Image: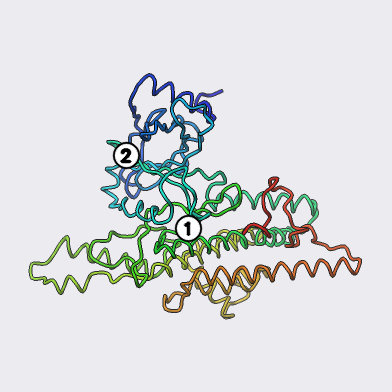
Amino acid sequence: MDKKAVTLDAEMVIFRAECHVAQCKSNQYQPYLHSGPQRQMPCVVQVPKNAFLWDWREGIMGFRDLDDPQCVISRCRCGYVFNCVYFHKGGDGKEKCAVALKLMDKRLITLEGDDLEAEVRAMRMLQHIGMDSALRSRHAIRWETAECPYNHYIATEYISNGSLISYMHKRFGEIRSDVHRYLGARANPVDAGKRVGTWFLHDVVLPLFHQILCALAYIHTQNVCHLDFDPYNVAVDRHRVVRLLDFGSSQLMDGRSSVGGGRDFPQIKTKLLYRSPELRKNNRDRATYQRFVAHRPPHATFRDEQKLIPPGFHGAKSDLFSAGVVCLEMTMFGFNYVGCTGPAFVSMQNPQYRDQFYAHVAKQCTTQTCVFCAHNLPIPPFILQTISKMMAPNPADRIHDAVALASEWKTNWDALLHKANDDVSRQVQHHQQPAAAAFTPSPVVARPTGSAAGQPTFATAC
């Protein structure tokens, strides 16, 4: 077997790390290439080799080989996220835990202008520091920090199912396999695709997005707004519980729930697809103000500068706009069959997706060009209505109460389940064989056959 393809399990990582610490007595580093700011300035970051002395409790962070397929979880602006194993020196190995270690090079932090203290401050508001601390919310995540001459580190719990987008790909594949196995090879691909999309809605979208709203409600009650909310910063653990990640762009809200205002705040870095209109405007205003300060005209007064200072915006409303985009992406993700490419609807390849969505909601669309009407997608109306409330272009028209949205979502979800159960019961009473009983969204007949033992179905996930 090729040496580069060897994957070490947790016990081997611990054994090698303990041997390395016993031999070297200090941290050793190895170079690793990084694409740099804006992926345009390649540079080298120093990554601990085999082990990193973590804390005063003789805690050690075990590293895998850099060519190990399981070593790097993802790339971030200032470094990488590594899949590590945390354990105590001389222990029996029972206290080990899988950790997602975010390594941030100090030089790249300076070049990117990231505010590491703001990220730590937001995480401290949501969860006590410590990998063994009690969770204040099931949607929070345990964390710790460390530092070395080269890097800053933030260690969080490792979530087995990965990000929300990875989990959606996994469940979509499982559901599609079960549907095609049930219907057989002669099934109409369009009907099979719609059944897959319907099952995906009830098994993934309805329960997980309710949890997303609950998670946003929790952080907003702690006066924290995420500002970089997208499917890659949401994780799903092995119990199908949503956990929020990456608070690198987060800020604390003031008494008016405002963020991004004032002279000293940096630009808020987010993904363009999920960025709210007011956050985009704030970034433009911030760039104008920074150019003014860098090249201040000699005749400029303090009043001229004050006019250019960004006023700030409502942080909770910006988060809910991003969550609405995520909900629309989740809703369309399951409808991927011949002639209908639902996952491509919310993407950079379709920059007019919001206009197309609102045209459909307002019934001003054209049947031939509207993806919802052309394919007659079986999406419950309350999902589209909730998304339209969250994605309103004008922040004044947008709802900001995540608690009320979560409660409304749960009420409509329960009503949809009851209606599906009543339809199945009515068919059984008339001695009719239900054509799609295996895929009807009810807690009795719709449990996925591919789910793990003990894993809650969509009816009990929240």
User: Could you tell me the amino acid type at mark 2?
Assistant: Glu
Report whether 91 appears left or right of 31. right
The residue wearing badge 1 is 230
- Residue at 43% x, 27% y is 89
User: In this view, which residue lies farthest toward the top?
Assistant: 23
Name the one closer to the observer, 133 or 409.
133
Secondary structure under tag 1 reads loop
Q: Residue, x 68% and y 70% (percent of image)?
A: 376
**10 Å neighbourhood of mark 1: few (<14), some, or many (≥20)?**
many
In the image, is residue 26 above or below residue 252?
Answer: above
Does 378 sit left or right of 251 as displayed?
Answer: right
- Residue 131: x %, y % from top left: 45, 43
Above/below status of 213 relative to 5: below
Judge left or right: residue 3 versus residue 315. right
Instruction: Determine the residue located farthest toward the right in the rendered image.
Output: 431
Q: Which mark is residue 327?
A: none
Q: Quadrant of the N terminus?
A: top right
Front of the two marks 1 and 2: 2
Picture coordinates of residue 447, whole percent (x, y) = 73, 54
Quick one: 329 or 263, which is closer to the camera?
263
Colour approach in the figure: rainbow
Q: Residue 147 got which mark?
A: 2
- Quadrant of residue 425 within the rendered picture: bottom right
Q: Residue 125 appears in which quarter of the rendering?
A: bottom left
User: What residue appears at the point 45 percent right and 61 percent down from the top-left corner?
Assistant: 219
Secondary structure at badge 2 equals: strand
Label 2 crowd (10 A; few <14 / some 14-19 / many >=20): some
1 and 2 marks in contact (CB < 8 Å): no
Quadrant of residue 393 in the image? bottom left
- Out of 426 and 231, give the one closest to the viewer: 426
Mark 1 or mark 2: name the one nearer the start of the chain.
2
Q: Position of residue 417 (x, y in %)?
A: 71, 67
